[in-house]
């Protein structure tokens, strides 16, 4: 008797969400099985990778991370264009570091002008990521939503404390909301319910569960993301049937393992940082990530190859 692989019957499905507009818009989600379980269900849309761009020159990046962008770090538009032209970026994530009240604290109008310039200069989907300061993000992201209303932006992080005002702006100008909660399945579901009650359509919502890199609690992140997928696919929990976005680059490259370069016990600093980001991203793919925000082109290349290998027939 031939051996038959036991298969799980899935009663749920992840929603398909379209990010961006035009020919370069991407669709994520749509899975009807656990990540890469192609023998049990469908994975119609492969995970996507967004490349980071900062609205000001980063001052504390590891040398290896800054090297590919050293010539454009002062110009977010040129930086975004380089990511697309030289490294094939499918999406751009503009990190609004300059608006942080604990840093430059630039006003909303300046940040909005930068976002608009970047949005007008690229033809791929644009993620706009704030600082997680509720008052500042509310001010900045609402202004951005109005000023760039001709594009379909992806705005985040949107948390419970600021979801009403940012969510209302996203509804009014038809932008996608990144629902962000601190690595807890119940809080994630609760925020999705609140955004739904506010009026955010299901096709304008993705989940940010908050993640970390290898060695910094990624096991717990994996467990929470895994439970989200289980609830969505096997328990018909419609409030968790949304694509997952993981802002992993900043979490891996800020660690001492990525920044330390003078310790021979840790090996080559550049290779170490690249592998740390690539391995962290791959683990999150296994947990159900649909969108990864990444930094180093070599790490992105490794993850793309892994996705291809896992989905090859």
Image: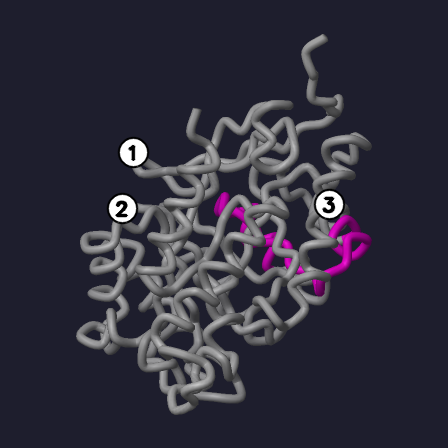
Asked whether 169 or 192 is in front, the reply is: 192
* Image mark for residue 228: 3
Q: CA distance from mark 3 to mark 2?
A: 32 Å
The residue labelled by disc 1 is 23
Asked whether 227 or 100 is in front, the reply is: 227
Q: Residue at x 30, y 76 (%)?
A: 66
Where on the picture, by quarter, is residue 86? bottom left
Where on the picture, by quarter, is residue 214? bottom right
Q: For the residues carrying marks 3 and 2, which lies nearer the camera in this image?
A: 3
Does the magenta portion include 177?
yes
The residue labelled by disc 2 is 123
Q: Which region of the structure is painted magenta?
A: 166-190
Secondary structure at badge 3 equals helix
| Mark 3 vs 2, N-terminal side | 2
Where on the picture, by quarter, is residue 222? bottom right
Image location of residue 149, percent across then percent down = 40, 49
Image location of residue 190, percent across then percent down = 79, 52
């Amino acid at each position: 008797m031939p051996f038959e692989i036991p298969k799980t019957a899935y009663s749920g499905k992840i929603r398909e969400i379209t990010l961006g507009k035009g020919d370069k818009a991407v669709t994520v989600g749509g899975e009807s099985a656990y990540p890469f379980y192609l023998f049990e269900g469908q994975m119609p849309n492969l995970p996507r990778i967004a490349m980071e761009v900062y609205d000001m020159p980063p001052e504390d990046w590891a040398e290896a991370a800054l090297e590919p962008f050293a010539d454009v770090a002062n110009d977010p538009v040129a930086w975004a264009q380089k990511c697309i032209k030289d490294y094939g970026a499918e999406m751009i994530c503009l990190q609004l570091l300059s608006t942080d009240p604990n840093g430059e604290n630039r006003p909303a109008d300046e940040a909005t002008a930068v976002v608009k310039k970047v949005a007008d200069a690229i033809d791929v989907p644009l993620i706009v990521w704030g600082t997680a300061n509720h008052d500042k993000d509310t001010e900045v992201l609402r202004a951005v939503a109005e000023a760039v209303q001709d594009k379909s932006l992806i705005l985040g992080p949107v948390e419970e404390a600021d979801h009403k005002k940012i969510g209302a702006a996203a509804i009014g100008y038809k932008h996608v909301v990144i629902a962000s909660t601190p690595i807890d399945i119940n809080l994630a579901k609760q925020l999705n319910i609140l955004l739904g009650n506010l009026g955010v359509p299901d096709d304008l919502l993705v989940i940010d569960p908050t993640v970390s890199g290898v060695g910094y609690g990624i096991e717990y992140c994996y467990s929470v993301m895994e439970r989200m997928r289980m609830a969505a696919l096997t328990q018909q929990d419609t409030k968790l049937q949304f694509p997952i976005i993981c802002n992993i680059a900043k979490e891996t490259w800020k660690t001492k393992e990525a920044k330390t370069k003078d310790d021979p016990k840790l090996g080559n600093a550049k290779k170490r940082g690249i592998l740390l980001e690539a391995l962290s991203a791959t683990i999150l793919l296994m947990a159900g990530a649909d969108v990864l925000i990444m930094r180093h082109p070599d790490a992105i290349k490794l993850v793309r190859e892994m996705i291809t290998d896992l989905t090859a027939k």
